[in-house]
Image (cartoon, rainbow, N blue to C red):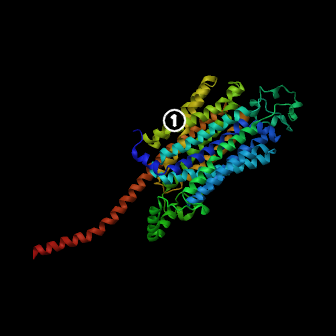
Amino acid sequence: MFVDERIVTLFKRNAHHTLTYWSVFFSFGLCIAFLGPTILDLQCQTNSTLSQITWVFFSQQFCLLIGSSIGGIFKRTLLSALAALFVSALVISIIFAIIPVCNNVLVLAIAMAVSGLAMGVIDTIANIQLVTIYQKDSAVFLQALHFFIGFGALVSPLIADPFLSETGCGNHTENGTEIMHHFRNMLRHSQIATHNITQSHLPHEAGEESNVHYAFWIMALINLPVPIAVLFLMYREQLIPCCHGSTPRLLDKDELAMENQQGTDGPDLEQKEHESGGHGNIFSCCQNDNLRGLPVSFFMIHILGGMVLFMTDGIVGAYAGFVYTYAVAPPMSLPHKTAGYLASIFWAAITAGRLLSIPLSYRFQPVRLLMFNMAGAIVTVLMLLIFYTSNTFLFVGTCLCGLFLSSIFPCMLAYTEDILDYQGCATSVLVTSAGMGEMVMQVLVGSIIQSQGSYSFLLCGMIIACIGFVVFIGLLLFHRMHRNYLTGTSKRSTMVEEPVAEPNGSAQTEAREDKGSS
């Protein structure tokens, strides 16, 4: 059997919880990928300029970062964790339903900010809960968890595609040169480019009517079973006050034993959890009591692991956001409909990569998968730079890039948590760093493309990937330092215990010598 019985038994024991956490990550994926293909239709809907509508991306990513930072607050009890997941998944369905009536870009940005908060809470809590359940066996289940992000991100563009308008709309800006370079390339061959300079400053009134609101309503309905599934899990766990059943839960005896044990040594356990930090929110990780007496390697593992994901998740966000812009610009100059498939191929490759990583994470250590994936991403971007005029290799490279980047986050999460023996705040730090990377890199790469041209898109990817790999090598060095620290600590504790037995042993030896002399 490819997966051993122990892993299967663990999954069966926690199947309901695991499937529920996987489903909320499907909501996360739905919400993260729909903006790219619908951005021009939303621009028409809000009667805004392209430079104004880009703030919708920023508002979602910024609030996703905030949600990831505060999400650990809700992990203290199962009730608070599941309640937060229920509210977050329900909010995503509500946001999908109200997007078609957001006729102002500020209102749309606020709606995206709320969805970003919900996504951040989902991101942190689902990761923390799975790591808490499976501990050292969490790598396989984290790979599956992040597969559902890719699946949701693949589904949402496919739902939106039939309802997108073919022409977009015009912009009424004060200065046409202020429009970002990559959006000019997107519109280069559209009907707008045939307008004269006066018409390009007026709202487009005669264009094709957009039906994209149907796509959002469909996504709202598709996502609705997710909060229902979370609510059902709360009901099964008897966490809904008005719905207590008469049948006792299977784990009641175990929980009673744990409560009795906590009654005897509860203060010590709470103190230990407080000192080690646990899987709390990122702010609790910065409390002075949690930092006292820990080695430098402990902090550097958090920092360097977060920096690696800052770079790699930044590449994911930037590639998904700007590969279409790169493809329609010279020297590629692909037709717009052909270039539109690139984002779907990228997310499909991420989905397939995360599915493939589920058995691989069982067979190989996370550090080996990380090394292979990061090296593969660098080689792929390098080949894209070399064959920058090849349309065929752009599609092949996009697929390979998605495959290599797909499992870096869950592998890094499993790797750092294993290094720290699940005593640090790695989950909250890594989730926050990944969200920050997506937000910053999208803005940074977009600005560079605007000023330096589309070819700088691949150069940015190459530089970011190389920096991430160098930081990863530093993480491996600090892992060795931390392992040596733990080994030295265990040896010192052993040496402290040995002198306790020495006096008794010497006394017994002297007594035997006295008897022999007498």
Q: Is residue 441 left or right of residue 296?
A: right
* Residue 281 visible, this angle: no
Is 506 or 119 nearer to us in this picture? 119
Badge 1 marks a residue whose secondary structure is helix
Pick the quarter of the image with the N terminus: top left
Where residue 192 sits: x, y (%)? Answer: 82, 29
Q: Which residue is mark 1?
A: 375
Where residue 295 sits: x, y (%)? Answer: 48, 57
Q: Is residue 121 left or right of residue 113?
A: left
Q: Tell me which residue sits at (54%, 31%) in the image.
A: 379
Is 466 or 311 nearer to us in this picture? 311
Q: Is residue 203 left or right of residue 446?
A: right
The correct choice, above or below, for 323 with respect to 490 in the image is above
Q: Residues within 10 Å of mark 1 (few under 14, many from 20)?
A: some
Is 210 or 287 nearer to us in this picture? 210
The correct choice, above or below, for 485 with respect to 146 in the image is below
Amino acid carrying label 1: it is Ala
Where residue 12 sits: x, y (%)? Answer: 46, 48
Toward the front, the furthest residue is 246
Q: Tell me which residue sits at (48%, 55%) in the image.
A: 422
Is 140 or 271 nearer to us in this picture? 140
